[in-house]
Image (cartoon, rainbow, N blue to C red):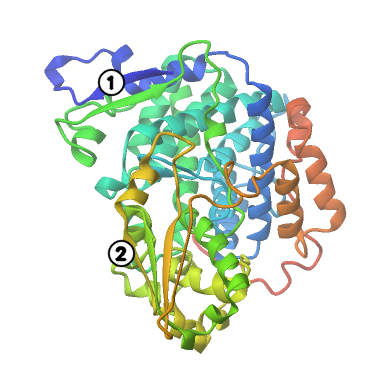
């Protein structure tokens, strides 16, 4: 890897195109380096992972709404077999690729249950897959080309996340997704450096937004935000292929993203990117979720399950005076009591809000000894009197050492958990800690292919017929050898009657 210095340049400095971060990203995208076997295997895992959580979301309101928008944009293949359109999870037919990316992106993100990478910024790199796959199906590429594109998408997002903090300035993390998805599509299609450069600039320019989408009363837009970035990446590629240009320099300009949205005119970053001929292995730095919750909650769920099993008395709020989770800055201020969001203690709050409340999540996992993507968030579960009583005794506190470990660049030291101190009403105390989730590569039960496959089967239960589940799993695991025709099978058809009584919202389209 090579670190590239990035800073704001005055207009009269005339920063060359070749010196701009967007151009350097485009150069990585056009590098024809082979994808390693290890990366290929992990891409297959994440295609399965995305499909599992999308399948489980098919009847959820944001997914139904996004899907209804997509199906209003059907497409008919050209007579020469090109421009085939793209599939949308949960329905038959082919649709315009940007709208397929949109609908599938919402389905993938809705449960907040797919992969993650956390460094200077936060991200769900699996959000790259819907737009890249949609374009692959539309233009008729094969599985090997798709893998090359996904490898680039992950690499660029991971590299940007390592170097440039967006949340520090309250910019939503999907601002790194537009450029990474555009780069991935460019790799897959074999586009020129110039074309990819222009698409990256447009994708970034159109996907910067504030983090209010993840603050206070969190709305259904949380699931739509990455899908919008993916949709914008597809449209940016289309415009760039037609010769349309982007604001330049998009990162370094004196009125650019860094100068006005991030660290300002004196900002300086070091962005790591693979050297020419170096394999794109960023996906191997990422990790997925065993539980449907914000990633910083994963380890806490595992610790809460363990404590509940070892000390059943902890499940009764009458036995507890206080529970303090000593943890990182991010966990405390974003999903903990440090956010000062009253909604994080509101039993009537939306699922999206409860998903970002570690006091709620720790309480339910402690009492139930388990975590379920639907039952754990059900209104009747959140409203249980004993849960509310215990929930209000749980607070978070930033701990400097856990913050340091959270930001560590050493993968063996990097941690997303913390230490819990429980004071009981009899005066005794229980203290325990956890660094990483059980499913983390360094955890107690690291996720492997069998776990991804099992996750798909669990989430598809009751949604797909068994034959459809096995069809998808068999096809996905053959990803490197899939033909263009077979790539169209990377979608799911729900069981008969799943949508019975489902109300499809009406809009403009």
* Image side of residue 298 versus residue 320, left or right: right
| Residue under label 1 | 5
- Is 300 displayed left or right of 290 in the figure? left
Q: Residues within 10 Å of mark 1 (few under 14, many from 20)?
A: few
Residue closest to the eye, 242 or 436:
436
Spot occupied by residue 479 in the image (x, y as percentages of width and height) = 74, 32
Residue drawn at x 57%, y 32% as measured from the top left = 284
**Quadrant of the rendered image containing residue 47:** top right
Residue ID for mark 2: 339
Residue 347 point in image, percent of width and height:
45, 80
Residue 456, given in percent of the width and then of the height, sits at 72, 52
Element carrying mark 2: helix
Task: Tell which circle, 2 or 1, labels the residue nearer the N-terminal end.
Answer: 1
The image shows residue 430, relative to residue 393, as above or below, that is above
Element assignment for label 1: strand
Label 2: few (<14), some (14–19) or many (≥20) C-alpha neighbours in 10 Å: some
Dividing the picture into quadrants, the one containing residue 371 is: bottom right
Please report the residue visible at 42 percent of the width from the left and 32 percent of the height from the top.
179
């Amino acid at each position: 890897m090579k670190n590239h210095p990035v800073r704001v340049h005055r207009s009269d400095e005339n920063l060359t195109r070749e010196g701009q971060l967007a151009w350097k990203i485009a150069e990585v995208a056009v590098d024809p380096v082979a994808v390693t076997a290890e990366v290929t295997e992990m891409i297959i895992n994440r295609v399965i992972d995305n499909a599992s959580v999308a399948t489980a979301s098919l009847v959820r309101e944001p997914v139904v709404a996004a899907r209804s928008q997509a199906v209003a944009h059907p497409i008919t293949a050209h007579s020469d077999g090109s421009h085939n359109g793209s599939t949308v999870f949960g329905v038959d037919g082919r649709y315009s690729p940007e709208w397929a990316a949109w609908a599938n992106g919402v389905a993938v993100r809705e449960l907040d249950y797919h992969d993650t990478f956390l460094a200077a910024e936060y991200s769900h790199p699996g959000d790259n897959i819907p737009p890249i796959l949609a374009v692959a199906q539309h233009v008729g590429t094969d599985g090997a080309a798709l893998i090359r594109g996904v490898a680039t998408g992950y690499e660029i997002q991971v590299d940007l996340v390592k170097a440039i903090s967006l949340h520090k300035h309250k910019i939503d993390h999907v601002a790194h997704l537009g450029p990474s998805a555009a780069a991935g599509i460019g790799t897959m299609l074999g586009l020129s450096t110039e074309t990819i450069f222009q698409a990256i600039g447009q994708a970034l320019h159109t996907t910067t937004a504030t983090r209010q989408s993840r603050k206070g009363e969190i709305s259904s837009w949380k699931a739509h935000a990455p899908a919008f970035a993916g949709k914008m990446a597809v449209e940016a590629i289309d415009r760039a292929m037609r010769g349309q240009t982007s604001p330049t320099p998009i990162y370094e300009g004196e009125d650019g993203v860094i100068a006005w949205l991030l660290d300002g005119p004196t900002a300086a970053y070091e962005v790591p990117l693979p050297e020419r001929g170096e394999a794109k292995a960023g996906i191997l730095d990422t990790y997925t979720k065993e539980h449907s919750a914000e990633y910083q909650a994963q380890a806490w769920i595992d610790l809460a399950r363990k404590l509940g099993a070892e000390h059943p008395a902890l499940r009764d709020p009458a036995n507890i005076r206080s529970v303090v989770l000593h943890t990182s800055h991010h966990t405390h201020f974003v999903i903990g009591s440090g956010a000062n969001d009253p909604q994080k203690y509101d039993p009537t709050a939306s699922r999206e809000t409860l998903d970002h409340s570690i006091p709620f999540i720790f309480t339910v996992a402690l009492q139930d000894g388990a975590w379920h993507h639907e039952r754990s968030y059900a209104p009747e579960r959140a409203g249980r009197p004993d849960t509310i009583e215990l929930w209000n005794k749980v607070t978070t506190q930033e701990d400097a050492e856990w913050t340091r470990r959270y930001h560590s660049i050493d993968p063996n030291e990097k941690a997303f958990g913390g230490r819990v101190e429980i004071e009981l009403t009899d005066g005794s105390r229980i203290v325990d800690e956890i660094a990483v989730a059980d499913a983390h590569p360094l955890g107690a039960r690291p996720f492997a292919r069998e776990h991804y496959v099992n996750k798909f089967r669990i989430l598809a239960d009751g949604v797909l017929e068994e034959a459809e589940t096995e069809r998808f799993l068999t096809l996905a695991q053959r990803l490197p050898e899939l033909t263009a025709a077979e790539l169209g099978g990377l979608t799911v058809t729900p069981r008969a009657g799943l949508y019975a009584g489902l109300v499809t919202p009406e809009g403009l389209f």
